[in-house]
Image: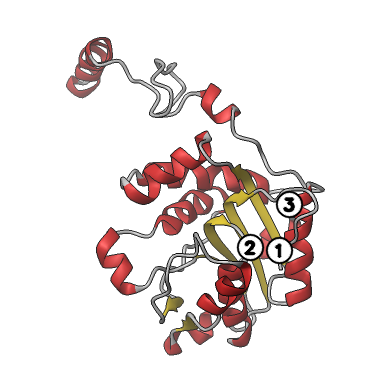
Amino acid sequence: MTLHSLYRGIITPFKDFVFPPLCFLCGSRLLSDEVRICARCWNSIRPVRRGDYTFTVLLERFAAGGAVDAFQAAYYFEEGGSFQRIVHFLKYDAVTVFGVELGLRLAKVLLPDPEMEHLDAVIPIPLHKSKLRERGYNQSESICRGIARVLQRPVAADIIRRSKRTVSQTHLSAEERRSNVGDAFDVRPKEYGRVSGKSLLLVDDVITTGSTIESAARTLKKAGARRVVAASAGLAMLDVGAKVA
């Protein structure tokens, strides 16, 4: 036994006894196979299913727009729910490990798609450079890192940029969202060769109306992308009968 393994065998159990690992969300003690969030909290988040009303509405919108060829999402974003709290930790408290974990879970949703075998790169929705300076990281890129571990594809965070600083989409109508992000993205001129003829996975943390990811997908298609798959860790749930205008 090495000194390092001996240290871990003694110190780690002692540390866990004195400072027991607790769930970030509910405060319960974590089991040995749980990391930062307990299984009960993960299981409290409603997964997105194909055929759900919200999923179907977004698919129809993307199909009508023509820029997004396929779409997948992992969980529903519900006000006050566990997923919202996870995203809050990720976006505002720099707990980027939550992004990686969301990416790992989103990758499991993506894996059954046979087109993933032909995927060339995983691309996060970019932040404007001023927002990136303020936050210090891109939460969508951390989700991409989790996806990349499973799909074994490179993360290409430098292909597309947000050339226009947009206002927060949170309180905007669907029409205002489209206008806000309509011309927000462009492909860096020297990166066209990495886009033309490629199959790309475009990833955001949460999709509400799809305006942001659709605008970015349209930019990639104009640069020659063969196929763009949109994916998000979270999807804002629509009331039955509501439409994404």
Instruction: Compute the Cα span from label 2 to label 1.
Output: 6 Å
Look at the image and tell me in which quarter the N terminus lies: top left
Q: Which residue is mark 1?
A: 244
Of the numbered discs in the image, which one, if any, rests on residue 54?
Answer: 3
For the residue marked with disc 2, what is the amino acid?
Thr
The reply to whether discs 2 and 1 touch (Cβ–Cβ < 8 Å) is: yes
Instruction: Compute the Cα span from label 1 to label 3.
Output: 9 Å
Say which residue appears at 32% left-offset and 59% top-offset: 137
Q: Which residue is mark 2?
A: 209
Res. 86 image quadrant: top left
Q: Position of residue 16 (x, y in %)?
A: 28, 15
Say which residue appears at 42% left-offset and 53% top-offset: 142
Name the residue at the bottom extreme: 189
Can residue 178 be seen? yes
Element class at badge 2: loop
Element class at badge 3: helix
Q: Position of residue 244 (x, y in %)?
A: 71, 63
Q: Position of residue 154 (x, y in %)?
A: 49, 62
